[in-house]
Amino acid sequence: MNTPPRNAERSKGPARVVFDKVTKRYGTSTVAAVDQVSLDFPAGKLVTLLGPSGCGKTTTLRMIAGLEMATSGRILIGDDDVTRLPATARDVSMVFQSYALFPHMTVMENVSYGLKMSGFAKGAIVPKANEVLKQLGLDKLAARYPNELSGGQQQRVAVARAIVLEPRVLLFDEPLSNLDAKLRRYVRQEIRDLQQALGLTVVYVTHDQEEALAVSDTIVVMNNAVIAQTGTPRELHDLPQTRFVADFIGEANVLPCEVISAGGSGEPAMVRLGGLVLQTNPCEGTAGQRHVAVRPNRVSLQPAGSANTLEATVQKATYVGEQMEYIVQCALGDLFVTASDTDHPIAAGEAVALGFGVGDVVLLRD
């Protein structure tokens, strides 16, 4: 199938991407790299695929791009079924982890290259490239070569080369992995600002949960080739559904509990945690032995003997600049706790009490 020529007037706008029970197996393997995945990526939003190495997130991204073909299921971009279409016929652009800039070409030549290959009108190529370079603050670097640019500048050139084609979907594969920590924070905000300003449909792959929380409208957490949970950054952080998600998104104390009532129909769940009976979120499942997750900053360190608390002893206290980190021992085991009060640290060996407020303890599905 031939790719239709592009010109300066042609633009379809951002598109929705739908996965309908998509599976990917390599060769004769019985193990699926992606297993019966159904997803809906809304038009004009940034959706992040997050998970550990080998979970299937990059394979999912490459199937959107057409660099991998689905074994079964359907992939839609807009109203078009692209499941069997080659990469050149999908109207998507991809920013690779390595940037993949042509070292012998200037910034202008790198950004213009895709326009030339797509049949853009010759007289419109330079103005179009200049427009995007200016948009990304690269217009003064147009004559430089990639080896004359910083890592952040190279990253922006890679983005410019992708968006100059006005793709219906823009894909990012671990785009910040080659940058140092400070530059990562700056460039991820640039990507987010650009996506929002242009209303782009972006699918973004990373294994870094902080990065995902910072840039995403929606996060899809993947594990072992399937979807573990989908939600907004706040939903995933504050209401994880499983032990895997609770532990992967930030840090969490996962503790055994007894479910007295699982809740539902507007009613909260009730759990017994140690000697305390606490109100928590309703969660599918039955009463009995389950687990709860508690974020380190949601455990309240109180004076020993306080009412409605668990007795504990501080095992280790560490100052890390903006907060104190504690390992505390109680009847439930060792808990990791953080506190913003760095002026009055609690010494190792001191007795304390652990308090939990409404919403601090999250009942898990498994």
Image: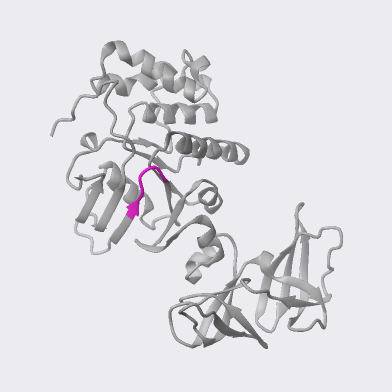
Q: Give the colour scheme of this rendering.
A: one colour
Magenta range: 40-45
Where residue 15 sits: x, y (%)?
Answer: 31, 42
Query: Quick one: which residue is furthest to the left in this view?
Result: 1
Q: Residue at x 14, y 30 (%)?
A: 2
Location of residue 8 by image quarter? top left
- Check the picture and name the quadrant holding the N terminus: top left
- Up-down: is 140 above or below 181? above
| Image position of 190 with respect to 294: above or below | above
Is residue 33 shown to the viewer in this render?
no
Q: What main secondary structure does the magenta stretch of the protein show?
A: loop
Q: How many marks?
A: 0
- The residue nearer to you, when weighing 328 against 40, is 40
Q: Is residue 1 left or right of residue 20?
A: left
Residue 56 lies in magenta, yes or no?
A: no
Residue drawn at x 43%, y 82% is 285
Residue 163: x, y in percent? 38, 30
The residue most toward the right is: 344
Look at the picture and state if 3 lies above or below 209.
Answer: above
Q: Residue at x 37, y 18 (%)?
A: 128
Q: Quadrant of residue 307?
A: bottom right
Residue 337: x percent and y percent? 70, 67
The quadrant holding residue 358 is bottom right
Q: Position of residue 112 (x, y in %)?
A: 35, 19
Name the outermost residue toward the top: 123
* 206 or 276: nearer the viewer: 276
Residue drawn at 51 percent across, 36 percent down? 193
> Would residue 110 appear left or right of 300 to someone viewing this image?
left
Question: In this orientation, does residue 281 appear?
Answer: yes
